[in-house]
Amino acid sequence: MELGDRHLVVQRASVGAKAGQPGIPGMPFEQFPELPRPILPAGDLSSNEARILLMLNMVTTDDLIDDQEYADLLEDVREEVGNYGHIEDLRIPRPVPRERGRTWSAGDGVDPAVAQRQDEAAGVGRVYVKYYDAEGAGKALKALAGRSFAGRSIIATLLTEDSQTTPPLDLVFAPQPDA
């Protein structure tokens, strides 16, 4: 494609392909096992017993650090997901507390990569919504999956109480001391 006085070359991304290697045109999507399938609502969800909505790509660690920004975010999310059913619980895990005005550095004694892995293992960046019934969770999934929030496309799925997740759901929804 010509763009101004230069040529723009566009190529479909291929996981595992080496730089400069052309893609395989005409190969069906099913034959690319390394490409993840999108999580989108499909089919009839009314018979599903899953009542926990998990949303990814909705919040970033930076959104969760400031107490006031976190409270506003929690209120906005609670208001939006409440439009689809009665909410039993809503959790947005926060990152490991950091000293005010400082970021992770070598002087803190905490490796930034280790801190990031700890946050990911704690579910930071995910939004968990537990509905009283599966119908509300299904409605929310259909309405929110693929929708844009703060310029990011929401990825959503439903979980049951016994779903195997990291962190485990019993830890995510564990009783919290009053703040």
Image (cartoon, rainbow, N blue to C red):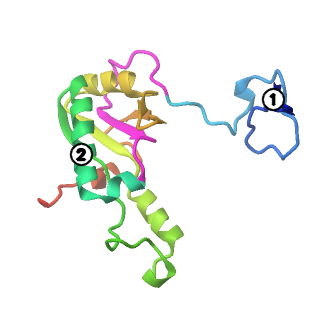
In this orientation, does residue 123 appear? no
For label 1, the residue is 4
In this orientation, does residue 179 appear? yes
Image coords of residue 164 (percent x, y)? 41, 47
Q: Dot 1, how many residues are within 10 Å of its Cα: few (below 14), some (14-19), or many (20+)?
A: few
Magenta residues, as a range?
A: 40-60
Callout 1: SS: loop
The CA span between labels 1 and 2 is 45 Å
Magenta segment: does it hold 53? yes
Q: Is residue 168 left or right of residue 72?
A: right
Q: Amino acid at mark 2?
A: Asp
Image coords of residue 144 (percent x, y)? 38, 27
Q: Amino acid at mark 1?
A: Gly
For label 2, the residue is 72
Q: Dot 2, how many residues are within 10 Å of its Cα: few (below 14), some (14-19), or many (20+)?
A: few
Callout 2: SS: helix
Image coords of residue 175 (percent x, y)? 17, 55
Image coords of residue 101 (percent x, y)? 35, 71
Q: Nearer the viewer, mark 1 or mark 2?
A: 1
Q: Quadrant of the C terminus?
A: bottom left
Q: Quadrant of residue 29?
A: top right
Viewer-proximal residue among 89 and 68: 68
Q: Quadrant of the N terminus?
A: top right
Q: Is residue 111 above or below residue 46?
A: below
